[in-house]
Image: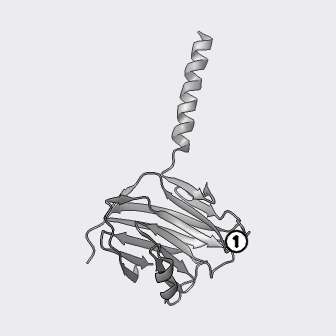
């Protein structure tokens, strides 16, 4: 009887551990740790050598387009000139202190593009980032104000989306992300 009770208890504890560790996020690069606040995360770069070190956290399940991804974030490490980014279907929204750009997985086009200024933006200050995407465009809002709009044709109906960052080569740096919300979005105009 005692052995059976211990086996049942062990099964329940294993189930609880699995449920507790289940997260809507995974980290294909760098490391992802829960923050001190409920629903917050600390994403840290991998300290790799090369041009830069990086980290990413993406949804474990694909998100249907159109969607809005919103979070409060800030850089914890010293590299305000390196980008924090939002991973979207077909590209990456890059934001660093005072500037924004979009990378649509085309190195040649990106090299010819420009970083657009964002007046007063400091990467070390907390900001609310909201990205809305449908099959035709990506709209970026920072602290409630639209700061960029990118035309992007996306054929797929869903994608893994998330956040990321770059840091100096060989350096382990972090960003803090909290209050993450993903929801359906109306078709953008």
Residue 114 in view (yes/no): no
In the rendering, at what x and y percent does residue 19 appear? 51, 39
- Seen in the picture, residue 145 relative to 6 is either above or below; the reply is below
Q: What secondary structure is found at the residue carrying circle 1?
A: loop
Q: Is 121 left or right of 139, judged from the image as shown?
A: right
- x, y percent for residue 64: 33, 58
Q: Residue at x 40, y 82 (%)?
A: 148
Q: Which residue is mark 1?
A: 50
Residue 189 vs 175, above or below: the answer is below
Q: Residue at the location (57% across, 72% down)?
A: 74
Q: Position of 15 compared to 158: left or right?
A: right
Q: Which quadrant, please, contains the C terminus? A: bottom left
Residue 177, x across and y down, in percent: 54, 65
Residue at image coords 28%, 74% = 188
Residue 40 in which image quadrant: bottom right
Q: Callout 1: 10 Å neighbours few (<14), some, many (20+)?
A: few
Left/right placement of residue 43 relative to residue 100 reads: right
Residue 165: x and y in percent read: 58, 70
Tell me the quarter of the picture where residue 104 sits.
bottom left
Identify the image quadrant of the N terminus: top right
Q: Which residue does the image show at 35% across and 58% down from the upper left?
A: 158
Viewer-closest of 75 and 85: 85
- In the picture as drawn, the residue positioned furthest to the top comes out as 1
């Amino acid at each position: 009887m005692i052995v059976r009770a211990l086996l049942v208890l062990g099964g329940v504890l294993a189930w609880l551990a699995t449920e507790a560790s289940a997260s809507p996020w995974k980290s294909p690069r760098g490391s992802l740790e829960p923050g001190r606040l409920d629903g917050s995360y600390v994403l840290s770069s991998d300290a790799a050598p090369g041009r830069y070190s990086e980290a990413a956290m993406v949804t474990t399940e694909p998100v249907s387009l159109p969607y809005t991804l919103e979070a409060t974030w800030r850089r914890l490490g010293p590299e305000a000139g390196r980008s924090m980014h939002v991973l979207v279907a077909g590209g990456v929204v890059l934001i660093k202190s005072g500037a924004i750009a979009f990378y649509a997985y085309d190195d040649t086009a990106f090299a010819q593009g420009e970083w657009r200024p964002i007046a007063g933006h400091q990467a070390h200050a907390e900001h609310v980032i909201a990205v809305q995407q449908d099959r035709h465009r990506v709209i970026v809002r920072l602290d409630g104000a639209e700061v960029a709009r990118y035309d992007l044709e996306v054929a797929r109906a869903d994608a893994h989306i998330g956040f990321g960052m770059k840091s100096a080569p060989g350096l382990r740096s972090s960003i803090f992300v909290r209050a993450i919300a993903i929801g359906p979005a109306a078709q953008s105009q």
